[in-house]
Amino acid sequence: MISVLQLGTLDYASGLRLQQRLVELRKEDRIGDVLVLLEHTPVITLGRNAKQKNILASPEVLAQRGVEVFECDRGGDVTFHGPGQLVGYPIFDLRGLPSSDGKRKTMGAIEYIRSLEEVLIRTCADFAIPTERICGLTGVWTAQNHAGTAAPGCAGTAQAKIAAIGVHISRAVTSHGFALNVNTDLDYFNLIIPCGITARPVTSMAKELKRELSLEEVAQSVSRNFGFVFQSQMLWLETLEALIPEPADVPLKVPDHLRKLRGGEETFRA
């Protein structure tokens, strides 16, 4: 069973504190696996392998744009989070997720990342956006016709990055996760070299479809695909208090319109 919480918009510091608390509780086995979905106020984050030079804008420009900067312990380089982007933080214990090849009892880090990519590829497909992987890179990319033979599961060429992935794993418990550009203002990405990759642009679902999407509908698709890929029931929770029986300094209420969208259904099985 994976519990799902959609918390609306949070500043990055609050989201980080929430993750840290959930990781502690998961390590203590006081909660089960949980997927947190949210949006962030504008922020640039630097992963463990980030290079400061990949932030192109000056501190003055960032301040004018209202963009914060945070260092964090996820993998990867520099990325942007902001309104219109669906951010997912899976707090999973990999020891409870068997390897798909049946050879290991525990899902490994690489397979976990590939599984996150598969969730996002399937989600984009739900909205008629073909996407794929690129060998040697992490994330999900829009597909384009290409000639030649690529390695299994990898594309020969791709157009633009639509979703970024960066994770941290401590004592088999995951944190951080993915950012899917839904209705994101892509101009923010001009402030950085996204993920340190200069040769490929960034795109969004809205740009690909030439229309804005309902973030709640995309969240529903993400949840369904998590259930399919990770072979689990998905249980939507109305409040953080339903997961954590103690006060937390973050907004707890799931928006009314999301409950209406779900039609009162609490459990979804892929």
Image (cartoon, helix red, strand yellow):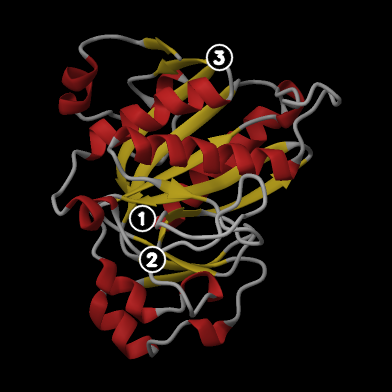
Nearest to viewer (mark 2 / mark 3): 3
Please give the count of numbered marks on the rendered protein: 3
What residue does disc 1 label?
11
Q: Residue at x 49, y 35 (%)?
A: 119
Asked if the residues shown at circle 3 and circle 1 are in contact, with their CB atoms under 8 angstroms apart, the answer is no
Q: Earlier in the sequence, mark 3 or mark 1?
A: 3
Q: Residue at x 85, y 26 (%)?
A: 104
196 over 180 or under it: above or below? below
What residue does disc 3 label?
1
Which one is in front, 202 or 135? 135
Q: Secondary structure at mark 1?
A: loop
Q: Secondary structure at mark 3?
A: loop
In the rendered image, the quadrant that contains the N terminus is top right
Amino acid type, mark 1: Asp
Asked if the residues shown at circle 1 and circle 2 are in contact, with their CB atoms under 8 angstroms apart, the answer is yes
Which one is in front, 231 or 26? 231
